[in-house]
Amino acid sequence: MVDPKLRRARGRSRGVSAPRNHASYTHRTVRAERDGAILANGANRSRKFQAPEGAGPKGRFASLGEAVAGFESARDRTLRYVESYDGDLRACTMQHPVRGSVTGYGCLLLLVMHPIRHAAQIEEIKAAI
């Protein structure tokens, strides 16, 4: 099922390229820079964050195997969604609790970087014990 917010964004900028001096070009450039910042800093553990209310661990997996299976299932659903989405992921935005306004494409970048960040967090904990 496609999120209604994403559905509304479909087609808004498909096939349209703005001239370099057009305001939307600047807007797209800023978003591209923000996407680059997600990739450059997404796994950086020098800044620590507390997960927002409701986003923390819920204890729903009884084993590491179950957790891996849950991760792979969620990843597969995301991949299927992206493969079937025919709109411009940069044309839709959402509010992220840490990054603020993020494009759909930026959300995908966050999905890539988030487990990398957690892997680094696990390594920090292992080194401390």
Image (cartoon, rainbow, N blue to C red):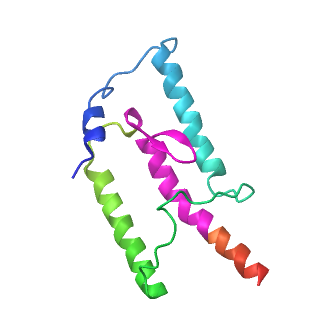
Horizontal and vertical percent position of residue 35: 55, 41
Q: Which residues are magenta?
A: 90-118
Residue pictured at 50% horizontal, 51% vertical: 109
The residue at the far top in this view is 21
Residue pictured at 29% horizontal, 59% vertical: 80
Determine whether 43 is above or below 33 in the image: below
Q: Is residue 14 left or right of residue 117?
A: left
Residue pictured at 36% horizontal, 67% vertical: 74
Horizontal and vertical percent position of residue 48: 69, 58
Tell which of 34 and 96 is nearer to you: 96
Horizontal and vertical percent position of residue 96: 50, 46
Residue pictured at 59% horizontal, 64% vertical: 116
The C terminus, quarter of image: bottom right
Q: Quick check: is 92 in the magenta stretch?
A: yes
- Residue 30 figure quarter: top right
Q: Quick check: is 65 in the magenta stretch?
A: no
